[in-house]
Image: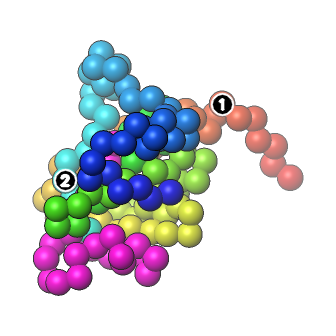
Amino acid sequence: MILNSTYHDKEHKEVISDLIGKPYSFFEALKLKGIGSKRMIINEVSPNLQAYLNRVSDINYANIEMRSGGIIIYINKGLKNFSWIIPYYQLVLYKTNGASIHAQGKFINFENNNMFKENKAFFKRLLDAKVIYDQRFNFMDS
């Protein structure tokens, strides 16, 4: 689900809270050693996400926020902001040349540069949170 988050909307806040949980409190964020990534350069996106990027040769940026039930990817397009809400059960991460996040038939690939390397600890926390979320459900191998 992608929402236009340029302006605050109470309905959007409720939808996000229902889908992936409320934001962490200040003390929970300190305990987790941070819940947000630094800004990263978008290298490539799926065709159905092209509308949310700058059409000219500007650099596209995004950052990620962790919640208890998923993540929010904030994409900046000029003066507009878009939020891609991804529950943990739909989230798939790949370590390619940089990092690639796949969900809901869409993907976003982040460039492997200094900004991405600064977020290495964040991605480890993100993977740990996804594992903890997945362990809540007892899956049987068939």
Q: How many other residues sit within 10 Å of disc 1, few (<14), some (14-19) or many (≥20)?
A: few
Q: Residue at x 22, y 66 (%)?
A: 77
* Amino acid type assigned to the residue bearing label 2 in the image: Arg
Q: Quickly name the residue at label 1.
A: 136
In the image, taking residue 131 as reference, residue 23 lies left or right, namely left
Residue 121 image position (x, y, % from top left): 28, 42
* Amino acid type assigned to the residue bearing label 1 in the image: Arg
Residues in magenta, as a range: 43-65
- The answer to whether 47 is drawn above or below residue 22 in the figure is below
- The answer to whether 75 is drawn above or below residue 13 in the figure is below
Please tell me whether mark 1 sits on a helix, a strand or a loop. loop
Residue 135 image position (x, y, % from top left): 64, 34
> Could you tell me how far apart the alpha carbons at marks 1 and 2 are, in whole angstroms?
31 Å
Q: Quickly name the residue at label 2.
A: 39
Tell me if I can see residue 139 in this picture. yes
Is 41 covered by the magenta stretch? no
